[in-house]
C-alpha cells in the first residue's frame, strides 16, 4: 500500500525494542522506495517516543472503526 507524508497510521505489531505496541498511532514522516516508511510515534504531550523505519507491512491505515486511547509508557533508560 502507498502512504502519504504526514498520514496517520496504526502499528500492526509490537516493537518492544522501541517501547511500541500493536495499535499505537504514528505519523509517516518520510517515504522510502519501494515499501518502507519512517514513522514518528509521539506521546500525548507531543514529545517523540520513537522514530522508526518500517516496512509497509508493519502498519495499516487508520479506519473509521479505530478508537484512540492513551496508555502509560515507562522508560527504562
Image (cartoon, helix red, strand yellow):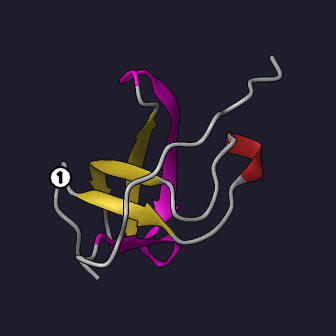
Question: At 74% across and 28% down in the image, what residue appears?
Answer: 74
Crowd band around label 1 with a 10 angstrom C-alpha radius: few (<14), some (14–19), many (20+): few
Residue 46: quarter of image: top left
Image-based side of 3 in relation to 15, left or right: left
- Count of numbered marks: 1
Question: At 59% across and 42% down in the image, what residue appears?
Answer: 71
Residue 17 pos. (x, y %): 76, 45
Question: At 19% across and 48% down in the image, what residue appears?
Answer: 6
Of residues 1 and 12, the one nearer the viewer is 12
The vertical placement of 68 against 71, above or below, is below
Q: Is residue 16 magenta?
A: no
SS under mark 1: loop
In which quadrant is the C terminus drawn?
top right
Of residues 4 and 22, the one nearer the viewer is 22
Of residues 33 and 6, the one nearer the viewer is 6
Image-based side of 36 in relation to 61, left or right: right
Residue 62 pos. (x, y %): 29, 70
Mark 1, residue position = 5
Of residues 16 and 56, the one nearer the viewer is 16
The stretch in magenta equals: 45-62
In terms of secondary structure, what is the magenta stretch mainly? strand
Which residue sits furthest top? 77
Question: At 83% across and 23% down in the image, what residue appears?
Answer: 76
Amino acid at each position: 500500500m502507498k502512504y502519504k507524508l504526514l498520514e496517520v497510521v496504526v502499528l500492526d505489531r509490537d516493537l518492544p525494542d522501541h517501547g511500541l505496541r500493536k495499535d499505537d498511532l504514528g505519523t509517516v514522516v518520510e517515504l522510502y522506495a519501494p515499501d518502507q516508511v519512517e514513522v514518528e510515534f509521539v506521546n500525548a504531550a507531543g514529545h517523540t517516543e520513537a522514530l522508526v523505519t518500517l516496512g509497509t507491512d508493519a502498519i495499516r491505515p487508520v479506519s473509521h472503526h479505530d478508537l484512540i486511547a492513551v496508555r502509560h509508557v515507562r522508560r527504562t533508560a
